[in-house]
Image (cartoon, rainbow, N blue to C red):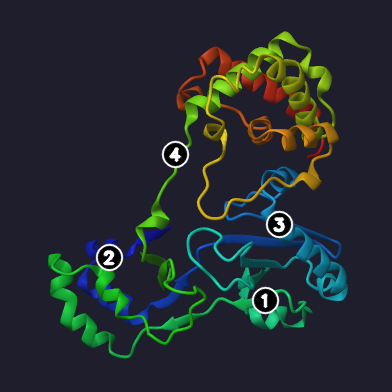
Amino acid sequence: MINDIEKLKIRSSKYIKEFMQGCTIEEKIDTHYITIDIISRNAIVFKKANGNEIDRVDLILNSMWNKLFLDWNYLKLSNASWFSTHVGYTIKMFYFPCATPILTQYDENIRYIFDKVIYNGHELNAEHILSDIKFPDVYKIDFKCFQNKIEDTEGVYNTNINKLLSGEKSFSEVFVSLINNDSKLFASNEPEGYVFKYKNKIYQLINSSDVNRKIDKEKTSYEFLLSNFIKYCKLHAYTDKITQSYTKTVCNLFNDYIINNEKPTKFIENNIDIDSIENPNIGQKFDIGYEYIPDQVTKTLCQESELYKNIFKVLLANLRKGKDFTHCIYLTKKEVDEWNMIMKNIKIRTLYI
């Protein structure tokens, strides 16, 4: 668990001194953290920071993943011997699909910053392990670095401890003084913040309050759409459109719903704001990955209308997820039960994404 650096105030002065003198300092990277598991000489699995695999649904919902897949499948083919001798290894890294992936500005050419490599539960030196991979010049890569504290932590501690514990001075203000001005930074200007590690404790200092900004999705319009889709499914033989592929199933249901319901009635269009069912976004917004949609009619409908595209994204992201009535605003208990039944009928009959 990562705590705010201000939470150090609840610790003893002895612990604070040990932390100051023993901690390492890392730049907090403001982008997407990716794990690559090398399953076999021919297979690698990509995972997001939450541990979930990046699959075809993700590739459709956000085209930024396309570059990641193309890069690493090319590397796998062009470095076959390396991958065959590193089965079981896990690579953890930061991925930059653009220069400003979230809020912090980075060098526009940087693509990957490697954090660590793990094998059999042991953390290995990433720069040493990956040195034999032939990366094309267009892949600007680097390795996560950390700096030790300044020499005079004893003086910083003695000067500030009473002011810190009394609240006269903030921990953020004092710990900024531990950062060397000439330390290597990846951010073009000010980084998102810094991470301080000591033994198994991790604290962070955030430079900008903007990175903590939370965007709450406007759930009423989103659930209004789901409610209408549920009603439509009840009146039509939706199970006839379920195939072995989850993505193809969603395409079939979406096509039928748009062509035979939304197009003639304009029910959703006339009752909600199009943007209200778009996923909240911080940083650069990417389009959907059309090349991964397995149905031409679906592609055409999504390109025809921003509303249709947003509806497709909502259905694609949600038809494999159950709903919890206690977290709903518009959907009734009966509708939640009906949604979960639709989701289960799809889940038990689909074999792949």
Dot 1 alpha-carbon crowd within 10 angstroms: few under 14, some 14 to 19, many 20 or more: some
Q: Position of residue 329 (x, y in %)?
A: 45, 23
Q: Tell me which numbered mark, 1 or 4, is placed earlier along the sequence.
A: 1
Q: Nearer the viewer, mark 3 or mark 1?
A: 1
Q: Position of residue 240 (x, y in %)?
A: 83, 18
| Residue ID for mark 1 | 140
Q: Quadrant of residue 196?
A: bottom left
Q: Amino acid at mark 3?
A: Phe
Q: Tell me which numbered mark, 3 or 1, is placed earlier along the sequence.
A: 3
Q: Nearer the viewer, mark 3 or mark 2?
A: 3
Dot 4 alpha-carbon crowd within 10 angstroms: few under 14, some 14 to 19, many 20 or more: few
Contact, mark 3 vs mark 4 (Cβ under 8 Å): no
Q: Mark 1 and mark 4: span between their CA atoms?
A: 35 Å
- Residue extending farthest to the bottom is 151
| Residue ID for mark 4 | 216
Q: Mark 4 and mark 2: span between their CA atoms?
A: 30 Å
Q: Amino acid at mark 4?
A: Asp
Q: Amino acid at mark 2?
A: Leu
Q: Mark 3 and mark 1: span between their CA atoms?
A: 20 Å
| Residue ID for mark 2 | 8
| Residue ID for mark 3 | 46
